[in-house]
Image (cartoon, rainbow, N blue to C red):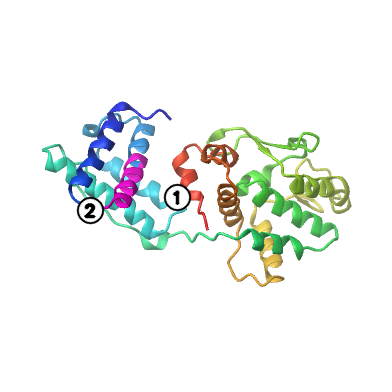
Amino acid sequence: MHYSDYFQTLENAFVEWLQRQGYQNTTQQGHRQRSRFFFQYLQSKQVQILENVTPQIIKDYEVYLDHLPLGSRTISSYLSTLRLLDEYLQHYGETPILTTKLKVTPDLETERVIFTQAEIKALYEVVNDDAVGYRDRAILGLYYGCGLRASEGLKLKVEDVYLDTGLLHVRRGKYYRNRYVPLSPLVQKHLQAWLRFARPLILTKPSDLVLVHTKGGYKNAASFGNRLEKIRANTDITKKITLHSLRHSIASHLLENGMELEHIRQFLGHKSLEITQIYTHVQ
């Protein structure tokens, strides 16, 4: 998304004001990032100037933050930036953007669990070498190795796995965007073993889906989460494991290994770079 000159100028002026108020440099940069996130949200809603910000837009922004994978403390920091921005505007006689009290809904706090690369390796190591085990490796490969969303793995078709070129075609993911995800040699190996050898042993009815049980595809991705929990129970790992925690983990590991943030955004299929920044947590 193009960042308008108007909001860029406003962002710089806001940070300069924070500097004059005596805020530390790291604090200034945090408020810069969070104010930019807000301004880009406004642009996505076709709001080009602050004078057009309504109470409903602020309310919608709070709801938007609540549905991101953010804890209540992090959401509080985003709202704190809004309060400071409003204070800055009023200091210079501008129209305030806040007319209602901002608050964080604690029960919407999302727990973010990041597995270390050693813990991911431990998950792979305890998987059995039977047909179900090959499917477990495929689940790990798709949700960790490829960073797929729950629905993307659920709907993935065999024809979209290009073993010869090492690519995965994710069709109509979130925001209705198609993308190609590269397969690491290990994921490529495990998917090949599942698709060519183990899957035909399990499947008794025709299906075009990658992840199947005996009678075809799954109704929802909860079954994959259950399998992950059974795998985790055979390790010394005490963290709660979910499909989404694997997606967060691969994002962090790619960043740790030197991949640029923009490439991680494309890998995960995010609409904006700011969402990718939320997902990446360097240990």
**Secondary structure type for disc 2:** loop
Q: Nearer the viewer, residue 67 or 255?
A: 255
Mark 1: few/some/many CA within 10 Å (<14, 14-19, 20+)? some
Amino acid under label 2? Lys
Q: Position of residue 240 (x, y in %)?
A: 58, 66
- The picture places residue 62, in percent across and down from the top left corner, at 34, 49
Is 41 included in the stretch rendered in magenta?
no
Q: What's the magenta region?
A: 24-37
Earlier-in-chain disc, 1 versus 2: 1
Task: Provide the secondary structure element on which disc 1 rests.
Answer: loop
Q: What secondary structure is the magenta-colored segment mainly?
A: helix
Left or right for 3, reference 88: right
Residue 193: percent from the left, percent from the top? 84, 49
Quadrant of the image containing the N terminus: top left
Residue for point 22% across, 46% down: 19
Counting from the top left corner in percent of width and height, residue 17 is at 20, 43
Q: Amino acid at mark 1?
A: Leu
Q: How many marks?
A: 2
Instruction: Say which residue appears at 65% left-offset and 53% top-offset.
Output: 221
- 3 above or below 223? above
User: Where does label 2 land, which residue?
Assistant: 101
Circle 2 residues within 10 Å: few <14, some 14–19, many ≥20: few
216, 201: nearer the viewer: 201
198 over 12 or under it: above or below: below
- Left of 229 or right of it: where is 103? left
Q: Residue at x 33, y 37 (%)?
A: 39
| Image: 202 above or below 152 | below
Quarter of the image where one finds residue 38? top left
How far, Cα to Cα, is label 1 from label 2?
20 Å
User: What number is the disc on residue 68?
Assistant: 1
